[in-house]
Amino acid sequence: MSVLVSPHFVTTSATSADSGESDGGEEEEENDILRKNPSGGLHILDRIDNGSISPDPMLYNTLLKRCTHLGKLKEGRMVHTHFVNSNFNHYQVIQNTLLNMYAKCGSLDNARKVFDEMPVRDMVTWTALITGYSQNDRPKYALVLFPGMLRVGLKPNYFTFSSLLKAAAGVPSERDGRQIHGYCIKSGYESNVYVGSALLDMYARCGQMDAAEFVFGGLMSKNEVSWNALIAGHARKEKGEDALVLFWKMQREGFEPTHFTYSSLFSAFASTGALEQGKWIHAHLTKSGLKLIAFVGNTLLDMYAKSGSIEDARKVFDRLIKPDVVSWNSMLTASAQHGRGEETVERFEEMLRIGFEPNVVTFLCVLTACSHAGLLDKGQYYFELMKKFKVEPEVTHYVAVVDLLGRAGILDRAERFIREMPIEPTAAIWGALLGACRMHKNMELGAYAAERIFELDPNDSGPHMLLCNIYATAGRWRDAAKVRKMMKESGVKKEPACSWVEIENAVHTFVANDDAHPQREDICKMWEKMCGRIKEIGYVPDTSHVLLFVDVREREAKLQYHSEKLALAFALLNTPPESTIRIKKNIRVCGDCHSAFKFVSKVVKREIILRDTNRFHHFCDGSCSCRDYW
DNA sequence: TTAGGGTTAG
């Protein structure tokens, strides 16, 4: 072996991927390599050229592995050229390493070319390409290779199965995953911890938690990854409680939680709005001694933001060791959704000032912020700014601009923008215009936009409901009824409204006209009492949102049992005075509930935070952070 | 020489 080959080069490169805890690790490793070979691989190639080093097969292998590890594609290409002109170009192992280098550096076309041109392909060759596709988000390409590999008589090993299962987890149908599972059983790899983890992850991503648990239970030995895969599965299904049970169990069985574990838990709590539980686990993370790297900090930040605790989200952002673009985007989203449009814009400007490159999501955040805060000029300016950063607008950016113009009330310009934009308008584009028409009571244009949506996406109940609302607000009950009839005939169903509130570590769910709740009578009494008090200070029920052919009194009664009002009454009954109330709703809050919540916040002198599908509403002393603009 | 688990927008 050449003296220039550091022992490091022949060790596996798996350390940097290990458990995501190696923040700064790659840098250290790179420094280590550079220290031992200060001039890097290119210098070594020069020395081979000028004859001061006589190459051996191991040297090429080492150089390629170094490029793989450091993601140095350009250097890898040069080593490739050198290698094919060497006397060792027939070495199978080096050809495999070369293929792997291209695959790991994301150059799948080159990896494929190497594969196609190889005179002999062994199991590692096939596995390296399968892994390349699987890890680079091309699962179908990975899966179609499998039958080919079997056809030439090669037997997959547990490396192959792990990658195949990862690929199968990335396609919508479960068929492939099940088939590969069958092969795993036949080959006896099912209980291998790598294969098993990939297998249970595949089932968990398909939503089949029972199958995932079964595989987990059958593992010969478990490690942090297998626990994390199962916890992540529950988290994705928004089963925070189940994830939490596993979190304690894994520790009882002697496994330390990793960044992955915390990250999954925080995302589960973010989806259910379980702030108290989230705070507990945050404290646990702090005590664990793990660093607050972006990997986990981003989910923590998001959890606080989604639970309505924007100040805590900001604290997390400020404490992050090395914020990445996702951290910035999450923080921008958080302040935008909490109605702090100006703050979002300032933060975005700061991001640009310090030289952070915005991406496609960043622009979407900032455009949405401008739209929600009514910052028309800024929004238009930032849309133009996308060109400077070479960020291609996606449909969602066009939607944001339509929303921006529409909310500002310049509906004709919004419509013109749709006609002149370079992409075909989608249902979401017309939906933004329809929403604006509802806000500014433009029935004619609203009906036109709704027609376009019905053509493009006839099964979405949202636009039907919006159009209904437009007609109902204008008193056009007959037209509203026609839309209802249309929905009924075409089988379009309105999503049932649902609200959640967390009290003492438990999340309580409410649906409209909830008869089943054990505290039903107390809740109704509380709301009636509250309703009386807010009426005294000026609350007038807004019945234009109730689409029923009934008299005003009945419509008013219907309004009073919306799920968010029930959740609020329940929170008032079960929380200490002066504490903040946090409620989450699965659809957009209606105008009447919004008005009632403002009055309640004044009467009870408490902050109420309501999260709906679009944004957060902070009600305090009779007003809302959205400035009635949502 | 080849492997598995996490996050931001809509």
Image (tube, grey):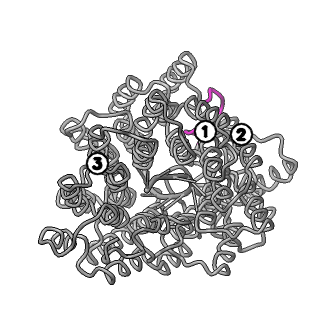
A81 vs A175: above or below: below
Q: Are marks 2 and 1 on the same chain?
A: yes
| Amino acid at dot 2 | Ala
Q: Residue furthest top?
A: A489
For discs 2 and 1, the disc positioned in front in the rendered view? 2
Q: Compare marks 2 and 1 and give the one earlier in the sequence.
A: 1
Please, what secondary structure does the residue beneath circle 3 have? loop
SS at circle 1 = loop
Q: Residues within 10 Å of mark 2 (few under 14, many from 20)?
A: some
Binning the other alpha carbons within 10 Å of mark 1 as few (below 14), some (14 to 19) or many (20 upward) gives many
Q: List x then y, in percent, for residue A106.
A: 33, 52
Q: Residue A17 versus residue A471: which sits nearer the camera?
A: A17
Marks 3/2: CA distance? 45 Å
Inspect the magenta stretch and tell me whether residue A547 lies in it.
yes
Which x, y percent locates residue A386? 22, 57
The amino acid at mark 3 is His
Residue flagged by tag 1: what amino acid is it?
A: Cys
Q: Position of residue A554 (x, y in %)?
A: 70, 35
Residue at numbered disc 1 = A206
Q: Which residue is mark 2?
A: A211
